[in-house]
Amino acid sequence: MTDQVLIFDTTLRDGEQSPGATMSHDEKLEIAEMLDEMGVDIIEAGFPIASEGDFNAVSEIAKLSKNAQICGLSRANFKDIDRCWEAVKHSKRPRIHTFIGTSPLHRAIPNLDMDQMAERIHDCVTHARNLCDNVQWSSMDATRTEWDFLKRTVDIAIKAGATTINIPDTVGYTEPVESADLIKRLIAEVDRADEVIFSTHCHNDLGMATANSLAAVQGGARQIECTINGLGERAGNTALEEVVMAMKVRKDVMPFRTGVDTTKIMNISRRVATVSGFNVQFNKAIVGKNAFAHESGIHQDGMLKNRETFEVMRPEDVGLSGTSLPLGKHSGRAALRDKLEKLGYEMGDNELKDVFVRFKDLADRKKEVFDDDLIALIRQNDTEDDRLKLKDLTVICGMNGPQKATMVLEVDGEDHTTQATGDGPVDATFNAVKALFDHTARLQLYQVHAVTEGTDAQATVSVRMEEDGRIATGQSADTDTVVASAKAYINALNRLIVKREKTAPGSDTAGIKYTDAGE
Ligand code: KIV
Ligand code: ZN
């Protein structure tokens, strides 16, 4: 038996079926191109009979794809199959996928008895095979289908000309030992099993989809159906990135190969998350934000000494530029020293001890400590060195704009005054700063929080600014929201000025980098 496992991606069909994950025509084409480029063997591009849009997307993908086989889904009836063929036939390597629910619960819906269903399978697979020499049969809900009947459906499909036999765990019901045994038994007991490829298609309702798919491969399946990020109905499908990386990392127990270029994983994962609107949870295997991030002191110390202490795969293998060691309350002295050195601060043990105490105090109050927090910490809230200081601010606002800000700003020890207008008092204020201190930094985030209740509450304003790939945040509190905004903005600018001297351009946007992400 070959050690090559075909990767059948159904992000654009089963993945798109998850409520709310609808993708536009152009987005589907873009994802299909990425799948093709990453070396996926089969792309299930849609369900052509489902809508005009699905039909057009499948036809277009069939025309454009270079290497992958392009597959469309069809229920087990001639009309669906014909429509599917019309869409996929443009591909250099078309495939028709047809299915029917074979378990007792699913047989009851079209109200077919076993003999009638057997006949339907025979007729539909034969019809599909007359159109296309690459036909996949799926006995939907196979894992809850009576063994004898499942075997019969598979037997009929093979005799009628199916080239791939898919055994779906439609409701995520099976478990790994059962999953492996089912495939093994089918291969052993069905006639001419060696003439077809057995495929596994697992849903994640009990969180076992990836384990079940890999177990099916151990049992003899040579095609895994999966989606990027595990996108799919309910709890989703087997995640492509998980099965591919598991086979790569555990070759010792799973000596199988795929043609997928794993370094493209992060890129496509991010794109699918964006276009589907399904964000990837932080702790998701392989593609989660935290999959290669370590905050605890023991882990960070280990990672700095030998990456393999806490990582079973290299971030570069999935398209990341490196591991991230975010500083937080669990971080230790080794990570702090490492980070400070990267920021250009060499310090002796005593000085580090002192900074470490202040760092822990800050980390207790703040989820993540960023570079500019550390710089501020080292400067010990000493604003003496700040190049910019707000000396005075008067803002006129109301219903009859434009709003006007008059500002006195000390720049390098000298007072400068200006008047600026803007679309609202905050905009006018920020324009005044820009007029007095020319800079190219872009405002990335502006947030206002009321610290206490009531109209006299202190407002805390946070801003984040970016300039040449360096990011700085600034914060300030005041009972006057506009004054707090001005101070926060100036605070961020002061930090950015320090960063210009201490760090290289791009130092903040390169922390977690995704190849070809264009960021
Ligand atoms: O989950 C399932 O059974 C399916 C089939 C259409 C293959 O998606
Ligand atoms: Zn499915």
Image (cartoon, rainbow, N blue to C red):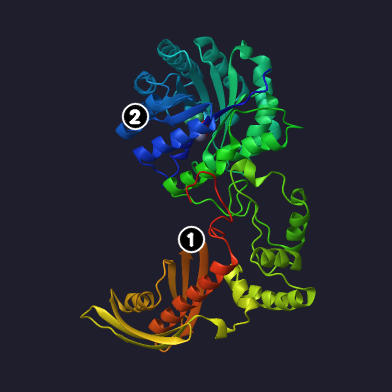
If the image is split into quadrants, where does the N terminus sit?
A: top right
How would you rate the neighbour count of disc 2 (Cα within 10 Å): few for under 14, some for 14-19, many for 20 or more? many
Q: Is mark 2 within 8 Å of ligand 1?
A: no
- Measuring 65% from the left and 35% from the top, which residue is drawn there? 212
Q: Is residue 145 above or below residue 15?
A: above
How would you rate the neighbour count of disc 1 (Cα within 10 Å): few for under 14, some for 14-19, many for 20 or more? some
- What amino acid is at disc 1? Asp
Residue 214: name its quadrant: top right
Mark 1–mark 2 distance (CA, rounded to whole Å): 44 Å
Which numbered disc, 1 or 2, marks the residue that appears first in the sequence?
2
Give the number of the disc on residue 207.
none
Q: Position of residue 366 (x, y in %)?
A: 60, 72
Answer left or right for 1 relative to 143. right
Residue 486: name its quadrant: bottom left
Q: Position of residue 338 (x, y in %)?
A: 71, 63
Task: Give whichever of 508, 277 is nearer the camera.
Answer: 508
Q: Are marks 1 and 2 in contact (CB under 8 Å)?
A: no
Answer left or right for 277 relative to 50. right
Q: Position of residue 253 (x, y in %)?
A: 76, 32
Task: Give whichever of 470, 54 is nearer the camera.
Answer: 470
Task: For residue 435, say whether it is visible.
Answer: yes
Q: Position of residue 288 (x, y in %)?
A: 58, 51
- What amino acid is at disc 2? Phe
Of helix, strand and loop, which one carries label 1? Answer: loop
Residue 384: name its quadrant: bottom right
| Residue that carries the numbered disc 2 in the rendered image | 55
Q: Mark 1 or mark 2, which is nearer to you?
A: 1
| Residue that carries the numbered disc 1 in the rendered image | 468
Q: Is residue 381 above or below residue 142?
A: below
